[in-house]
Image: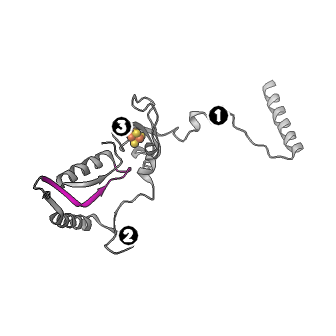
Amino acid sequence: MPKESSRREFLKRSAKGAAVGGATAVTVPTAAAENSPATLKTANTTKTNSICPYCAVGCSVVVHTIGDKSRNVKPSIVHIEGDPDSPINRGTLCSKGASLEEFVQSDRRLTTVQHRAAGSREWKRMSWAEAMPKMARFIKDSRDKGFEAEDAKGRTVNCLKNIAMIGGCTDTNEINYLLSKFRFGLGMVAYENQSRL
Ligand code: SF4
């Protein structure tokens, strides 16, 4: 059979080549095979469209997960990328958006309240049940002490200068919006964050 014989010859030649060179035969993937969608880590993922939470630009993202209830495997995110069909970002993401996967599942992500007592150098974990009334007490006491209804010339100012608040680039747009409302309600002047509200 010509097909069998050519296959045998090919194997013989390969074996000879390996023996002559003293080398181990390896399969070298072609560029086409390397770039094949079947070899990508997103090949068998479930794709879910979502929106980057970080700022008001609202870039669209595609979240790739593996595992679901029907396969009895806990779902986990393997990749998040810009949605090429989005008219807003056309598949691109800024550096914050590009790190979204870490935002969801980094083992360095803080998941509990961290409290540093006055005069202490150490941060300690605290439960929300303990932290919430403590924060409310501190804020109320500080506001009672520092709130100014009028300035020295009797003009209405309704401001609070003895409490400051910061938001971070990893706070979501919605959290920073709510923080803004909260601090306006208190009269707080010193407030900084990186969201584009
Ligand atoms: S943080 Fe970046 S990726 Fe996210 S919505 Fe804003 S511009 Fe887009």
Q: Quadrant of the N terminus?
A: top right
114 or 39, nearer to the observer: 114
Residue 46 rendering spot, x and y as whole percentages: 44, 39
Q: Quadrant of the C terminus?
A: top left
Answer few, some or many: residues within 10 Å of disc 3's Cα (few below 14, many 20 plus, some between 14 and 19). Answer: some
Residue 118 rendering spot, x and y as whole percentages: 31, 73
Q: Residue at x 57, y 35 (%)?
A: 38
> Which of the two discs, 1 and 2, sits closer to the camera?
2
Which numbered dot is residue 33? 1
> Mark 3 vs ligand 1: CB under 8 Å?
yes
Queried whether the magenta region covers residue 53, the answer comes back as no
Query: Total marks drawn?
Result: 3
Q: Residue at x 26, y 46 (%)?
A: 177
The amino acid beneath tag 3 is Gly
The amino acid beneath tag 1 is Ala
Residue 54 rendering spot, x and y as whole percentages: 36, 44
Q: Residue at x 37, y 69 (%)?
A: 123
Residue with the most extreme bottom position = 119
Asked if residue 173 lies left or right of residue 29, the reply is left
Residue with the most extreme right position = 20
Color encoding of the figure: one colour
Q: Label 3's element? A: loop
Quadrant of the displayed image that contains ligand 1 = top left
Q: CA distance from mark 3 to mark 1?
A: 35 Å
Queried whether the magenta region covers residue 166, the answer comes back as yes
Specify start and end residues of the magenta stretch as a single range: 156-171
Mark positioned earlier in the residue sequence (1 or 2): 1
**Would you say residue 128 is visible in this rendering?**
yes
Q: Label 2's element? A: loop
Q: Residue at x 46, y 33 (%)?
A: 91
Disc 2 target residue = 123
